[in-house]
Image: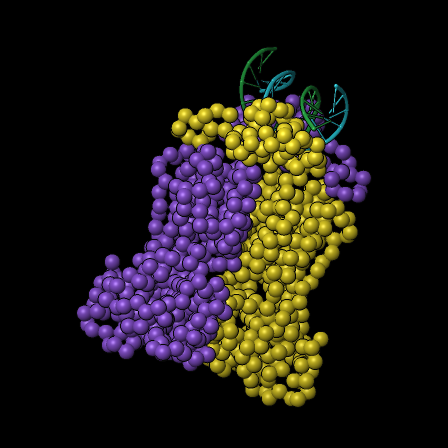
Chain colours: A yellow, B purple, C green, D cyan
Amino acid sequence: MSESTGSSQQLWSAPTIRDVAAMASTSLKTVSRVVNDEPGVSPELEQRVRQAIARLDYQPNLTASNLRRVGGRTRSVGLLLSNVENPLDNGIQLALEAAALERGLVVISSSIGENAKRERQLVDIFTARRVDGLVMMPAGPDQSYLTDALRQRMSMVFVDRPPAGFDADAVLVDNRAGTARGVAHLIAHGHRRVGYLGALQSIWTAKERVDGYLDALDTALLAGDESLIRLDLSSSDDSYDAVIRMMSAEGPPTALFTAQNMITIGAIRALRDLGLHRTVALVCFDDMMLFDLLEPAITVLAQDPWAIGTLAAATLFDRLDGSNAPPATHVIPVTLIERGSGELPGPFRPSVDQVAAHRSDRLQ
Amino acid sequence: MSESTGSSQQLWSAPTIRDVAAMASTSLKTVSRVVNDEPGVSPELEQRVRQAIARLDYQPNLTASNLRRVGGRTRSVGLLLSNVENPLDNGIQLALEAAALERGLVVISSSIGENAKRERQLVDIFTARRVDGLVMMPAGPDQSYLTDALRQRMSMVFVDRPPAGFDADAVLVDNRAGTARGVAHLIAHGHRRVGYLGALQSIWTAKERVDGYLDALDTALLAGDESLIRLDLSSSDDSYDAVIRMMSAEGPPTALFTAQNMITIGAIRALRDLGLHRTVALVCFDDMMLFDLLEPAITVLAQDPWAIGTLAAATLFDRLDGSNAPPATHVIPVTLIERGSGELPGPFRPSVDQVAAHRSDRLQ
DNA sequence: CTGTTAGCGCTTTCAA
DNA sequence: TTGAAAGCGCTAACAG
């Protein structure tokens, strides 16, 4: 341990376990025992060691200890999200951090965006740091670059989107059934022309949701109409434009389903500007703060980020504890929250049957 | 490198640099050179080594390499936020992650909440992991547990709140002046009784903001009124109750200033329920998505999380690069965004002078 | 109870 | 251009 000459920090080095041992006039191993609360150190010696630790302001170097420790675990887990500014991602991060802290793990996180290359780059970085486990929301179309060999050293759990070309645990949401229910809700309220505004089709959830929309049309024996479907919207501005155009065209929809929160915001703006927000019904995938304070308040299919994050953490920890069960996929339900925008009536008065059918569906 | 027997992952170990050297029939050091792009390896040998790396799916162990490397940097930075679900925290995290990635650093993050004990616990955890730098939003009232010795090894930058009892770089926001400007805005619009709803006084920003409120009253030669001030609100429900009570009491305010986003949400709900949202003016600290879509739209003092995070990152990197300048505090301005709720007129018609004064103030 | 020796995976130093 | 040896800070295995 050398003193700083006062210039840059590199010149100063942290006290090591040797410095402590020297100051306490004992051996390296004894200090190690004290630091790790291992038994077999006399109270007097322990006292001396603790004093030396305090005096030197010694902090054990966890990365060095992990190197030799059995199993070589770093007690860290990686988290690869799409975008920390998204409420779903936040909730998952918060839940994982809470679960990890309880277990003495730290979370290393980074945002991928929707970029396959960056996904691989970040997986490499995390692998090089030897995280014990990885929770990820994959961006790329294919995860076959992940190998079984890698899985041996790093447990992996996918959230929100399943892996492709690689078999692993996943915690998903019932995008398809949820969307179908939301669209059925609009149909039950008398709508026959329901517009659909979807996100980038490269995203798995986006594809599932369109399928759910088509399912609902099928179930109601309604024909799909190309002019009512706009996909690959990547911002609220995209969505704004799409809604303006769709509502201004021939045979506009009487209701809209927006498949993601940024798209929803653009749609709300557009409906306002057209003066149609109290006329055209709206159901959205993803809840957001303040949706309940808009007029009309927004009817949504709400996901449960905390549940997703908590289940992902539990699944990961099972693997870390040595579970060898075959990979499983967990699906978390979404909740339809009726607030007004989705209950604006359509031109076809709902029959008692339809409403009843819808009600019983909801109870299920 | 031993094969797995198929049970648990601990039995399998990752290929090491030795395995690669053996397979390429060369020495350890040569492989190291190839991995680190050091010069002095013949093309043929390099080729052999790269093949072995690919065949073994070798990934260098970064933590092991950092152990011996000069300076001993782990190329990681810690981020301690208050709450990842807060938009300000998100923005800072996103900006820091982006800056860190560009520099080849990873970000280890965790949320403190408003708990001083947890703050220290997390600082210890990050110290033990030898992060090169730390960006933190302190929760506790005192950071004197941080030492100069520690600073030598771990650069520190505080965001949103300054450290107490320890001198370090900080990136703050002009909470006091910003709040004063927001309150002056209400006064200029004819209000004399402005209610104030504030967060936990244990939080530095909360204290600054009350002071700003009092400053504005002083400047306008208005007397403060205890019944118009509610502090230590910790949730939107708290805020809701406080507003209901304040508006139902004798001599209610004609305008409100809410000092934080959750408090704002409670206040908006309360005003709605009282049917006063088009009557009582409202200016808020912190912007949120959808504030512009409420009726009336919400006038806010907006912070710039990206600017805060980017500046914090730049400041931290300066230190990592060896800067020894005395610690500096940077203050980022807030922006008043007029949207309607803050421009609802009060009982005292503004004089031309007042409006003019206010306008020129805004230009500054 | 205490200490010694070896070695984790890698970089450094220095010699060939 | 290449490699052997030493050692980063710590724990494991095995002595005393």
State left or right for residue B343 relative to residue B260.
left
State left or right for residue B243 relative to residue A226.
left
Count of numbered circles in the view: 0
Q: Position of residue B233 (x, y in %)?
A: 45, 64
State left or right for residue B17 relative to residue B135.
right
- In front here: A85 or A181? A85
Q: Position of residue A219 (x, y in %)?
A: 69, 77
- In front here: B95 or A211? B95
Q: Position of residue B308 (x, y in %)?
A: 40, 51
Q: Quadrant of the C terminus of chain A?
A: bottom right
What residue is rendered at 44% in x and 71% in y?
B242
Above or below, B193 against B169 in this view is below
- In front here: C7 or B272? B272
Question: Would residue B320 be visible to someone looking at this image?
Answer: no
What residue is rendered at 70% in x and 53% in y?
A315
Q: Position of residue B30 (x, y in %)?
A: 61, 24
- Quarter occupied by residue A48: top right
What residue is rendered at 69% in x and 50% in y?
A317
State left or right for residue D13 relative to residue B127.
right
- In front here: A260 or B169? B169
Residue lying at the far front of the rendered structure? A44
Question: Would residue B253 be visible to someone looking at this image?
Answer: yes
Above or below, B199 against C10 in this view is below
What residue is rendered at 23% in x and 66% in y?
B221
